[in-house]
Image (cartoon, coloured by chain):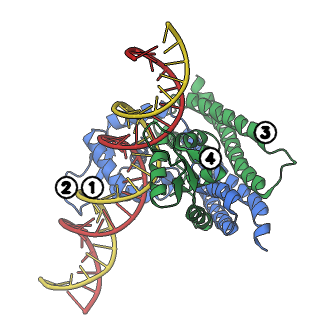
Chain colours: A green, B blue, C yellow, D red
Amino acid sequence: MSLPHAILTALLEKPSSGLELARRFDKSIGYFWSATHQQIYRELGKLEQAGLIRALPAAAPARGQKKEYEVLPAGRAALTAWVAEAGDPRPVREPLLLRMRAAAVVGTAGLAEELRRHLELHRRQLAEYRAIEERDFPPERDSEEDRLRHAVLRGGIGLETFWTEWLTETLAVVGEREED
Amino acid sequence: MSLPHAILTALLEKPSSGLELARRFDKSIGYFWSATHQQIYRELGKLEQAGLIRALPAAAPARGQKKEYEVLPAGRAALTAWVAEAGDPRPVREPLLLRMRAAAVVGTAGLAEELRRHLELHRRQLAEYRAIEERDFPPERDSEEDRLRHAVLRGGIGLETFWTEWLTETLAVVGEREED
DNA sequence: CACCATTTTGCAACCAGTTGCATAAGGTCC
DNA sequence: GGACCTTATGCAACTGGTTGCAAAATGGTG
């Protein structure tokens, strides 16, 4: 039940149309909860029906025509409640770790290359996060909101840092004996 | 497409019945790819039909009766191929990070308690991993398989370490101003 | 041996997320 | 103004994962 709340958050930050939301999910919020435009349109429909958001323009709602949504008080209340809700961390689901296990049984052929590719991807993501950090969180900006959002970004940075370190380490274990 | 390969790996490590698999998924493999017994039974059926595994006992296969499976050569081949396959890392999907974002907009009421709860959970998981590490990977065990499996476990340890550190840090940001 | 709990397997329905495609409006180019 | 591209919304079908429940074998207890 996270997607509706992700959308409510995004809409509170700035009222948007479905497509705008989809684009914003490709960065920022989407770094921690990605969604396709389909999911977003469907969920916008549900949220509207539930009375948590409403469409703005009142122009005849036709197909190829932009529809902007804003959050209603009930929506804000639902989001506030969700912040305090208990919810366990999701179990890790990373196929790469699984593949390592499989490799322990059937051999590591082709694995090192994958590890290198992943390392490159995580390095790139890490660099992107760091650029955002420099751009959006200079030392002088330090409101409550900034500190919270910065903490989220530091989460991303920490995760990518972990993966680059682990992959580097692990390549030392796997890589060498695959070269021969 | 990870579950079938997780099952193949588990079955190669040791031929098992569905329920045994389900139990083993609650530890070890399941730390990185969890699955319910339903998923497992369904997948076992598919794998059998695909000719990648087969049921052992040949006794009349009835409902409440144990059925052991073992991996066939085709299954091993499929797993070997999968190890080398390209597959991008999954995007992070952690509701807690999302809730932090939401909290930046609607306030942090109730958040600190959740952070503390998560911190406790991650500490516990970390302790469990470390215990497994001591038990299963003493310095003298150092075969190829051991090194790979140990790397996987180090992955888990690294992730839990990251979360405990991030949560501690973040509690310092959120916790203080919620006490008043 | 009738009764009951446990073990093991499984069906059915559901929810969340993905993929592929369709349709409408608006702008651009000739 | 017809052909075409982009923007925007959406339907339908599918896949992966979850939940709730049922049902057959097994094994004990009175």
Q: Which residue is mark 3?
A: A135
Residue underneath mark 1 = B67
C-alpha gap between disc 2 and disc 1: 7 Å
Residue indicated by mark 4: A29
Q: Amino acid at mark 2?
A: Pro
Mark 2 — residue?
B61
| Residue D20 horizontal/vertical position (percent) | 34, 68
Marks 4 & 3 on one chain: yes
For the residues marked 2 and 4, what is the alpha-carbon distance in whole angstroms? 50 Å
Name the subunit of mark 2.
B
SS at badge 2: loop
Amino acid type of disc 3? Answer: Arg
Evaluate if marks 4 and 3 touch, with contact meaning CB atoms under 8 Å apart: no
Tag in front: 1 or 3: 3
Residue B50 in view of the camera: yes
- Badge 1 sits on which subunit? B
Based on the displayed image, in which of its 4 quarters is residue D3 positioned?
top left
Q: Nearer the viewer, residue A112 or B90?
A: B90
In the image: residue D24, left or right of residue B68: left
